[in-house]
Image (cartoon, helix red, strand yellow):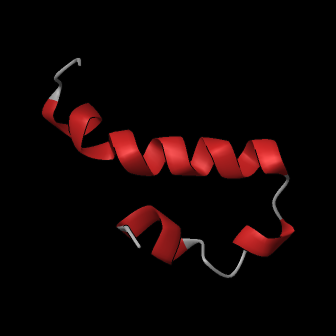
Amino acid sequence: MGKVIERFAHSVPSLSHSEKHVLYYIETHLDTARDGRSE
């Protein structure tokens, strides 16, 4: 698991399907956003 998922792991079961998608999207694109790169 990544940093974001680990941080919010206790809340994941109560999230809606859409909210989980947003969380996973953030997780997978966090490094790109930090580096200021676009894919």
Q: Is residue 17 above or below residue 36?
A: below
**Furthest residue toward top:** 38
Q: Residue at x 33, y 44 (%)?
A: 30
Horizontal arrangement in the rendering, residue 35 relative to residue 23 (left or right): left
Q: Residue at x 62, y 41 (%)?
A: 22
Question: Residue 18: horizontal and vertical position, in percent?
Answer: 78, 41
Picture quarter with the N terminus? bottom left
Q: Residue at x 51, y 67 (%)?
A: 5
Q: How many marks?
A: 0
Q: Nearer the viewer, residue 21 or 11?
A: 21
Picture quarter with the C terminus? top left
Question: Residue 16: horizontal and vertical position, in percent?
Answer: 85, 53
User: In which image quadrant can residue 15 be found?
Assistant: bottom right
Q: Residue at x 81, y 49 (%)?
A: 17
Horizontal arrangement in the rendering, residue 8 relative to residue 36 (left or right): right
Horizontal arrangement in the rendering, residue 24 relative to residue 16 (left or right): left
**Furthest residue toward bottom:** 10
Q: Is residue 37 above or below residue 3?
A: above
Question: Residue 25: horizontal and vertical position, in percent?
Answer: 50, 41
Horizontal arrangement in the rendering, residue 12 relative to residue 9 (left or right): right
User: In which image quadrant can residue 9 be found?
Assistant: bottom right
Q: Is residue 25 above or below residue 1?
A: above
